[in-house]
Image (spheres, rainbow, N blue to C red):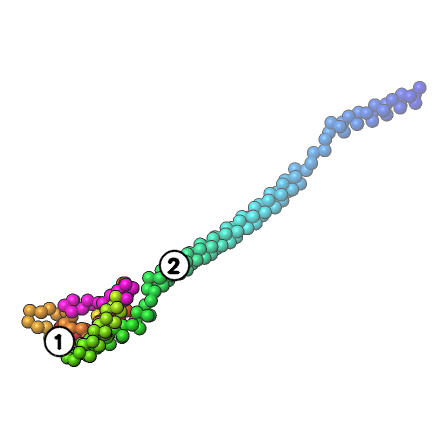
Amino acid sequence: MAEDKKTEKIDETVEKQTKETKKTKVKPDKKVKGEKKSKKQSKTATQIEELKKQITELHGKVDAITDQYIRAKAETANIQKRNEKEQANLVKYDGQHLAKDILPVIDNLERALAIEVSDENGKQLKKGIQMVFDHMNKALKDNHVTEIEAVGQPFDPHIHQAVQTVAVEEGGKADQVVSVLQKGYMLKDRVLRPAMVVVSQ
């Protein structure tokens, strides 16, 4: 009987202690928890800084590539425009070299026509030269080669080449073309050969 009572007492004590243990929860150390949180925050902040740095670098690379692309595109457009202009000029001034080579022939024909003839053979020969000259002049005009106006015109260094100067005559003007020593020609708006002129001063 006495033993049963002892056993009951021990059981009650164990039960009581078990209940107290359950009630008393072991609280984690606040300091340790705070340290863990601080380490985690520090790690996150470092990662954010690294990501920001990477973003800045990527932005720089994107800007550099964009700039290169824009420059390349502009350069391509310029090359294309230059090629188009060159092609247009080739078409516009097609035959320029041929026209230049023909001009001395025209000069020689004009010199031949300036010679005075009296006999019938000479007149027939001059008539033939005149026909050749007229045909060549027509061919030049049909291909937009025109003679530069000179005599009585104001001197223009773009289309005239002054090879001699003379004093201004009474009632005349300075810087006027007085006479032409060699005719000048233009192909459309381009000077093939400037007119060699005498200018008043």
User: What residue sits 20% from the left and 79% below the top?
Assistant: 121
Q: Residue at x 73, y 29 (%)?
A: 24
91 vs 172, nearest the viewer: 91
**Please, what is the three-letter code of the amino acid marked with disc 2?**
Glu
- Can you see residue 109? yes
Assess whether residue 156 is covered by the magenta stretch: yes
Q: Earlier in the sequence, mark 1 or mark 2?
A: 2
> Looking at the rendering, which quadrant does residue 21 occupy?
top right
Q: Which residues, given as a range, are shown in magenta?
A: 139-159
Residue 156's label in the rendered image is: none
> Marks 1 and 2, Cα distance to the nearest angstrom?
46 Å
Magenta stretch: helix, strand or loop mostly: loop
Q: Which part of the image, by quadrant, shows the N terminus?
A: top right
Seen as rendered, the residue at the extreme left is: 170
Element assignment for label 1: strand
In this view, the residue in front, 7 or 127, is 127
Query: Tag 2, which secondary structure?
Result: helix
Seen as rendered, the residue at the extreme front is: 120
Residue 40 is a magenta residue: no
Structural crowding at the residue carrying mark 1, measured as other residues with C-alpha within 10 Å and reported as few (<14), some (14–19) or many (≥20):
few
- Indicate the quadrant where residue 96 lies: bottom left
**Residue 193 in the image, given as x and y percentages of width and height:** 26, 71
At 10% from the left and 73% from the top, the residue drawn is 168
Pick the residue in front: 36 or 21: 36
Q: Nearer the viewer, residue 96 or 139?
A: 139
Q: List the residue tagged with mark 2.
A: 84
| Residue at which label 1 appears | 166
Where does the image place residue 122, in percent across and percent down from the top left? 19, 79
